[in-house]
Image (tube, helix red, strand yellow):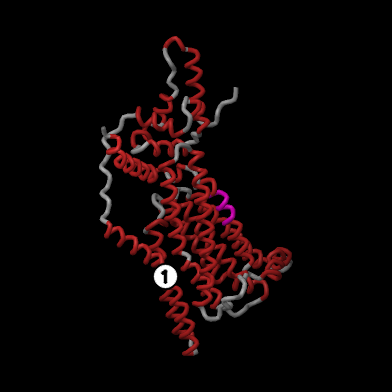
Amino acid sequence: MPVSRRPDEASARTGAGKGQGKGRRGPADPVRALMHRHHDLCARAVDPLEIAAGLEAHGVTDRTAARFRHRDVFSLAEELYARVPRAEEPAPPAAPAPGRALGVRMTLAALWLLPGALCAATASAAFRVDAIRKDTTVGLGLGAGGAALTLIALWLCLRRGPLRVRGSGRGGRMAHALGAGWLLGYAAAGDWLLSGLLDGRRPYEAAPAAEAAVLLALAAAPAAWCARWFAVRARRRLAVSRGLEEFAAGVRPLFAGVVTAFLCALAALVLAARLSVPGSPPAAAPLSTAEAAVVALCGLLFLARLLAVHGFRRAALSGIAVACAVQAAALATAAAARLPGAAPFGEPVARLTASQGAAAVPAAACGAAALALLIHAFGALCRASAHGDTGARTARAARDTRTARTAPDRAP
């Protein structure tokens, strides 16, 4: 007889078997073993929805719940919530005053817009100062100062609001920072370095790098807004769903809409970056390969951050690591091809850059990694366990509000 890979499924089958063999001693209780196994989860839960999300994270599905004599996981979670004793629940935090809540939202909105505004102003001022003074020293100093302020603003955006990753250790934060730093560094100088390794030394062009920096900084605002919109709508969907399949079916269109909205925002931001940086392609020009590479990088970073925010930090880091590895491999093969007798190692990269340009390497690397993360996120972020902790509290508050509204109507 095959053994189930999931312990909860195995306990369900064992409980059912015991009930059949000992029917004279009383009805079987297959839920008891599950209740003891997940006692801590049930004791700390403030709502059955939180238990349902935790059970889903442990591999319990509606089919598994049927073996426990329940129609779905939510029904099973309601029984566990009712049977497991718990300490007195802490009082919910007081809702902020309307004026204070509006002030917090306005502050966050200004914080999301700050990196793009700083970077665009710095790039525009630095190029215009260089054109007037015919001296790059002042422009470099202005650009360095503006870049430092932009990085500080980006750090604040990632530490506050919907883009904040809670519970990540120092090692995880360091790995994410190194991966993102590599990708940003390649966006600034990777194409120039790769072209130099393949064709010899070339002058560094600051305009494409500045346009890439402005586009990346401007993308912080739509990324934060899309992340917040998705989290809020998913929690509302969790509050009204009565099954895992129903919740997933309702969240999939939300996730698809968020990704589409972010990509549409990037299309508008490309035009804004062109207008901000002198020497960029004309506003009516088609999307260049270099701009496509930056758009792919923005999509990769957005999906990685969205996964990390909802608890899938390993998947997010894997996507970033794949893109970094492809870019590093392209540079390594181009450098190895300069050695005597090693020219064949650099032929694939040389052919790609000869036909599509040096920016084709980061475009392919970031695009492929972003596509892989998109496929993974489409399944991972549509599960209740990705929104369970905060979503359960939101669902409870929504249900209490509905009960309070309907209580006068039920009174005799």
Q: Nearer the viewer, residue 268 or 365?
A: 268
Find disc 1 in the rendering and name its residue: 150
The kind of residue tagged 1 is Thr
Q: Is residue 185 above or below residue 368?
A: below
Quadrant location, the C terminus: top left
Q: Is residue 308 above or below residue 142?
A: above
**Residue drawn where x is 45% and y is 81% of the image:** 125
- 145 left or right of 256 in image: left
Q: Is residue 149 visible?
A: yes
Where, by quadrant of the figure, is residue 118 drawn? bottom left
Q: In x, y percent, where is residue 141? A: 43, 80
Q: Is residue 393 above or below residue 259?
A: above
Crowding near the residue tagged with mark 1, few <14, some 14–19, many ≥20 C-alpha atoms within 10 Å: many
Q: Nearer the viewer, residue 274 or 180?
A: 274
Q: In x, y percent, where is residue 328? A: 59, 62
**Residue drawn where x is 66% and y is 67% of the image:** 334
Region of the chain picked out in magenta, as a range = 370-377
Assess whether residue 376 is covered by the magenta stretch.
yes
Assess whether residue 263 is covered by the magenta stretch.
no
